[in-house]
Image: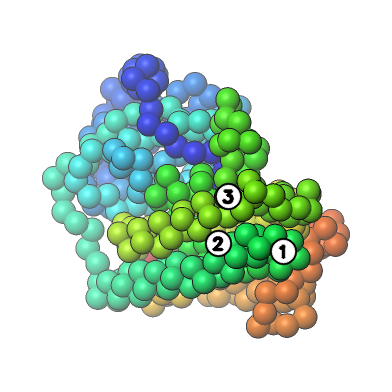
Amino acid sequence: MRPARFTVVTAAAAVAALTAVTGCAEKSAAGGEGTLQVAASDSACGVSKTEFPAGKVTIEVDNKGSKVTEVYVLFPDDRIVAERENIGPGTKATITAEIKAGDYEIACKPGMKGDGIRQKVKATGGTAAKRSPELDAAVADYRKYVQAQADESLPTTNAFVDAVKAGDVEAAKKAYAVSRIGWERTEPVAESFGDIDPKVDVREDGLEAGQDPAKDWTGWHRLEKALWADNKIGDDEKKLADTLMTDVTDWQKKIGTAEITPTSMANGAKELLDEVATGKVTGEEERYSHTDLVDFKANVEGAQKAYELLKPVAAKNDPELAKTLDTQFAALDALLDKHRADKNGYDFTSYDKVGDPERKELSDAVNALAEPLSKLAAAVTK
């Protein structure tokens, strides 16, 4: 769940962003040809150069501000090429991405809300990043996987929607978490279509300033609140259920057109672990239903699928990294199994029944996996 939506940046904001980065943009010689340095702060998003060769690009982010930030590489229509979330104050992060020739925007989002402070950049000339047949196969198989997840989400979401429209609160509660599994497994790809995520997966506190929850809040979490906090279904909720079905169907139709590369798969796996660390472990994501561990498991499964498809190349290029990832994925899976009776099912312990020591144990396991997983993109492009 992305905390806030992207909208088209206003002309005034674009001018402000360009002004903010002028000083840094003049340092066009900084870094290697395939390296772009981003200096993020609470009021600026400086880039070391506004043009760079297309192909494999390493983006080095330095958050000099006082707020947690996110950095995105965006197509002109706001589709996401690459991203890194939850970059803490005073910390650095590296994004490895394959970027084709064309126009893009770098967006820094201090506080992780709003349109972001943006800078226009251009990838020029260059050559397509070299891929092995193994990586081509990995991308093809992952594309099939994300399409299958979207396809399988239609009947599960329809079952949830039917229960809501029938006014059956208990049936809707049972169908709720299951309807979200496909989305959670493939969330980075789903979120690359910036217009869908805010419709289906935003929390109330993720709405932008000035948005009215009664009018502007839609999707799973709006219905979650109605079912668990209000314990009732009215005409508004039935209409929202229809809207959810429309939006999930839209996702299912669009997913086949998503831009997928080996580095986007690797970065997406890391993003799924970030989702777990910032939303699931804390209990913020499913604050009414407490079905956080279902989302947690689905996020981990999605990350593990991307890794397993990339593993033949990663293990060849960095065998120690592959061994570490195998170990940490197994450890996290075993830990999650402690919170469900059936290891093949999704009937997890309600998260409000998981104590602080167990939550810390889960958090530590996520962190132990996230750190080496952040190196996967670089490993598959060596």
In the image, residue 149 lies at what x, y percent? 47, 70
What type is the residue that disc 3 sits on? Leu
Binning the other alpha carbons within 10 Å of mark 2 as few (below 14), some (14 to 19) or many (20 upward) gives many
Q: Name above or below for residue 327 compared with residue 116.
A: below
Residue tagged 3: 240
From the viewer's perspective, is 359 left or right of 326? right
- C-alpha span from label 3 to label 2: 20 Å
Residue 68 in view of the camera: no
Q: Is residue 357 left or right of residue 153?
A: right
Q: Quadrant of residue 138?
A: bottom left
Q: Is 16 located above or below residue 141 in the figure?
A: above
Q: Give the label, 1 or 2, closer to the camera.
A: 1
Mark 3 secondary-structure assignment: helix
For disc 2, the marked residue is 184
Q: Position of residue 141 (x, y in %)?
A: 35, 75
Q: Mark 1–mark 2 contact, CB under 8 Å?
A: no
Circles 3, 2 touching at the beta carbon (< 8 Å): no
Residue 168: mark: 1
The residue that appears at 41% across and 41% down in the rendered structure is 72
Of the image marks 1 and 2, the number of the one nearer the N terminus: 1
